[in-house]
Amino acid sequence: MRLLRELAGDVPAGVRFLTDFVRAWEGRVARLLDAAERRDPEDVTTVLLSVRTASGMLGATALSSAASDLEHRIAATHQVDGPAVRRLVEVGTASCHELADLAHRLEAAPA
């Protein structure tokens, strides 16, 4: 995990970041879906920036790439693609399950 390498192996800090990201996912999803429903490209992009940055720090490359792709699409068209937003939510939810599993394994690993 990229974040742990950058933290020089500080597992508790890495686990905290992982769990905070996973806990925040539902709120990000709610805001993202609300912005998509309102067809608000700026608000969608704001959420995507947060998702892309944090998932990139965690090494969740599929989620980071999906957020980046959607950001670029919105920048090019100035429109919100509802199906693409829903696909991003699916990728993010799957990524959060993987990150939560990683956090549990790291917490259980001997120091």
Image (cartoon, rainbow, N blue to C red):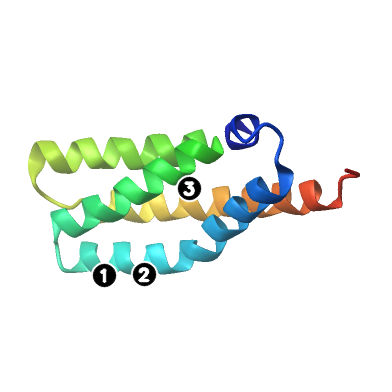
Please state, as top left, top right, bottom left or bottom right, where the N terminus lies in the image: top right
Q: Secondary structure at mark 1?
A: helix
* Picture coordinates of residue 88, whole percent (x, y): 39, 49
Q: CA distance from mark 3 to mark 1?
A: 18 Å
Tell me if label 2 and label 1 are in contact, CB under 8 Å: yes
- Looking at this view, name the residue that lies furthest to the right: 110
N-terminal of the two: label 2 or label 3?
2
Residue at left offset 30%, top offset 35% = 69
Q: Which residue is mark 2?
A: 30
Q: CA distance from mark 2 to mark 3?
A: 15 Å
Q: Which residue is mark 1?
A: 34
Taking depth in this image into account, of 39 and 1 the one nearest to the observer is 1
- Labelled disc at residue 77: none
Rendering quarter of residue 3: top right
Residue at left offset 80%, top offset 52% = 107
Residue at left offset 39%, top offset 34% = 65
- 26 left or right, relative to 36: right
- 80 left or right, relative to 65: left
Please state, as top left, top right, bottom left or bottom right, where the C terminus lies in the image: top right
Q: Secondary structure at mark 3?
A: helix
Amino acid tagged 1: Asp
As drawn, 36 above or below 68: below
| Mark 3 surroundings within 10 Å by alpha-carbon count, few (fewer than 14), some (14 through 19), many (20 or more) | some
Taking depth in this image into account, of 108 and 60 the one nearest to the observer is 108
Amino acid tagged 2: Ala
Q: Secondary structure at mark 2?
A: helix
Q: CA distance from mark 2 to mark 1?
A: 6 Å
